[in-house]
Amino acid sequence: MKKIIVILALLVLFPAISFAGGPISAYKLDSVKITQVPSEKPKMVAVEYAFDDLSKVKKHFTVGLGFGGNPLIGFVEKDGFGYPKCEYGVTCVAGYGYTWISGQPTEKQIKNALEAIRSKNGAFADAKKLPSMVREEVGIKELKYVEFGTFAALVPLNLEMGTMWVLNDNTRTRLGFGLPTLISFGINFDF
């Protein structure tokens, strides 16, 4: 009985093993033609009505590198055009800081920029590119800031002031001076 089972198993397995690695039918690369690369169309928004949606201030998570009052982990509140209003979180000097940011464009400047974009590019624009287009048109990339916070556990007060630059929709950098940190610099990535 065992011999019969072994013989049947070999008869079943031997043909399967012998055909493994056999010829595979495949298309020649010359015969496959790509007629059109599928691409995803960007979401378009009406430039005329973009101000209402993008002027709303939202809270974003931020992670940073640097020294001084620059937040390592925290939150930034900014509008849809990428201009921050304030930020707060754990700073690089093991403290907590709250930063007020000023110098953002006025409502009139943004509306004029949107009108200029509309006259140049038409009534609709790519939703992802519109904030950077507005910042380019307005021309304001440099903002001023004042920070109040703590410096480690030893000094309960840290005051700083300086300049912040908006590099793109999600990246900001800063350079400032204060007491007791003397110099503050860093870069933040907003999510």
Image (cartoon, rainbow, N blue to C red):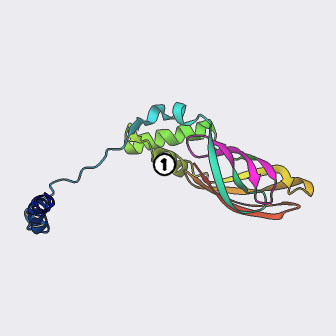
State the residue position of label 1. Answer: 133
- Residue 94 part of the magenta-drawn span: yes
Measured from the top left, where is residue 117 in percent x and y? 45, 43
Relative to 20, residue 141 above or below: above
- Foreground residue among 24 and 52: 24
- Is residue 26 among the parts visible in the rendering? no
Q: In which quarter of the image is residue 71?
A: bottom right
Is residue 25 shown in magenta?
no
User: Relative to residue 96, is residue 24 drawn left or right?
Assistant: left
- Does 48 sit above or below residue 60? above
| Drawn side of residue 88 relative to residue 26, left or right | right
Is 147 on the left-hand or right-hand side of 139? right
Residue 107 placement, left or right of 131: right
Quadrant (top left, top right, bottom left, bottom right) of the N terminus: bottom left
Dot 1 lies on which element? helix
Q: What residue type is labelled 1?
A: Met
Q: Which residue corresponds to the image point at 62% horizontal and 43% vertical from the top-left?
A: 60
Residue at left offset 67%, top offset 45%: 76
Identified at 14% across, 55% down, the residue is 35
Q: What residue is rendered at 52% in x and 42% in y? A: 113
Q: Where is residue 164 in the image (x, y as percent from the top left)?
A: 69, 56
Question: Which residues are the magenta region?
Answer: 74-98
